[in-house]
Structure formats: C-alpha cells, structure tokens
Amino acid sequence: MNRPIVFLTDYGLTDGFVGICHGVIARIAPEARVIDLTHQVARQDVLGGAIALGRAARFMPDDAVYLAVVDPGVGSERRPIAVETRAGALLVGPDNGVLSMTWAELGGAERVVEIAAHEVLLHPVSRTFHGRDVFAPAAAHLSAGLALEDLGPAVSTGNLQVLDLPSPMVTPGSVGARVVTVDGFGNVQLNVTPAELEAAGLGPTLAIGSRDVPRVATFADVPIGGCGAIVDSDGYVALVVNHGSAAHLLGLSSGDSVVLGG
C-alpha cells in the first residue's frame, strides 16, 4: 500500500507545473493519495512555505511523505534531500530550510540522504524544474516503498539548512512584530502570541499607527468593515477585518514590520 503524499509548492495553479508533478507521481505510484496542502505559497517565499508545512504536519497522516518545492535556488549547488523523521514520516525537497520546521514538528531529522540515484531521477534533469525531475519522482518512489538509502548518499543531519520563526521584540508598552503570512482572505498573521502581548502590558485595545484595534474573539465581534485582533487557529495574533481584508486596510504584506502599542 502506498504512503500518502502531502504536496506543497509556490507554483500556483495558472501553469501546468502542479499537474505535471501529479502525472509523474501517478506513473510511479498510481495508488498514492496526494494531499495538495497548498500551491499558493508566495513565490520564492521559503520561510512561508516552511511555516505552512510545519504547522500542517500534526494534522497529516503519520506515514506521510511530504513533498515541498519552494526552490529559488533550483539548478544551483543546493542539495536535493530526503529526510526520515523520528516520527517515521519522510520529507522530500531542497535543502534550503523549507523542510526544517516539519522535521522539528515530527521529532527531528533521524536520517538524511541526497537525492542522486540515476534510476530515480527523470532524465535529462532540467536545471529549472527539479519538482518534476527530482522531487516528485523521489517522493513517489518513497511512497511506493523504496528505502531511503536507495535514493542516494547519506548526509549529516548537522549540515542541513534550518529556518526559525523570528521572535517579536517585546518591551514595556509595545511589541515589535513581523507579518508571517497573509492568507487568501487578507488576514494578517503576526509572529506574536497572546502571552507576549500580556508580557508587554498591552490591554484590550492595540494601537497600530493611528488606528485603535480591539482584541476580539471572533470576526463577528467587530462591525462589518471593522478591524480587530484575534487569536487564530495556530495560536498566534492575527489582524482581521470583518467581511474585508486587513492586509489591504493596513497596507501590510508578508515580511513587513508592525509595532503594536496600547
């Protein structure tokens, strides 16, 4: 029985990239169930991809093969890798940190190999589409039961690229935050927890520039078109607009800095 494949990319859905990768997987492991987590990671946003995959991991099947392709260094010297986690899940993608939050969520990286086996890669290997020629076939072969070591030579777990979520700057009366993600609804997730707001001594209303933003429990707790700060499903503070886009209203994008006062 094939292992399920959890698939994340920054390819979008306008072009055929995702469909071609699905086709490669189907040719190698036709019974594999592919869970398309998202293909709308912001282009080349490795940290955003790492966060999305890592936060989803606890909801995925225990025996999943994670296939992540957010790869601005495609064709360079960065390694294509496959990772076995202590929890037993397998991860496939570039060694640029996009997998690192997922193996951390799944107990750490137990074994790692570089994807190099001639019989696994699709030839000729494109220098611009490793999702098709390297990562999708590797994930499909693992799903179908290929041993990790058959993908290529071992890599030291201590030599892997790791990304971390930046910490906010917490001072009395203010929190210097960073926009982690903006979702499709325009909700703005920050790298701040409610505990960090409390540590700064911030009360029920936050000051963002000249705007007062109430801390609320649900979208409906602010009027239509109104802005509020909620605790989202990941446990982080998010800025939202009832029936609107906080990103548009506040002029915020992923990676932006924002100061929360009170």
Image: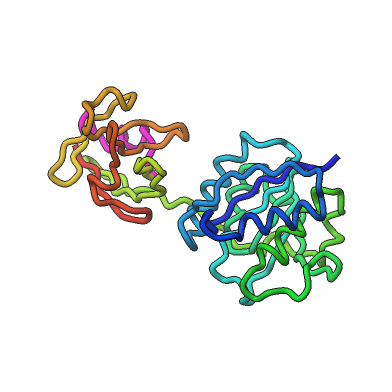
Residue at figure coordinates x 73%, y 74% from the top left: 125
Residue at figure coordinates x 38%, y 31% from the top left: 231
Residue at figure coordinates x 70%, y 52% from the top left: 91
194 part of magenta stretch: yes
Quadrant placement of the C terminus = top left
The magenta stretch is 191-205
- Outermost residue on the left side: it is 210
The image quarter in which residue 199 lies: top left
Between residues 86 and 96, which one lies in front from this camera angle?
A: 96
Number of labelled discs?
A: 0
Q: Percent x, y for residue 214?
A: 22, 30
Q: Percent x, y for residue 53?
A: 57, 47
On screen, residue 62 versus residue 19, left or right, reads: right
Between residues 245 and 217, which one lies in front from this camera angle?
A: 245
The image quarter in which residue 194 lies: top left
On screen, residue 56 versus residue 22, left or right, reads: left
53 part of magenta stretch: no
Q: Percent x, y for residue 261?
A: 20, 41
Q: Percent x, y for residue 19?
A: 64, 55
Quadrant placement of the N terminus = top right
Residue at figure coordinates x 48%, y 59% from the top left: 45
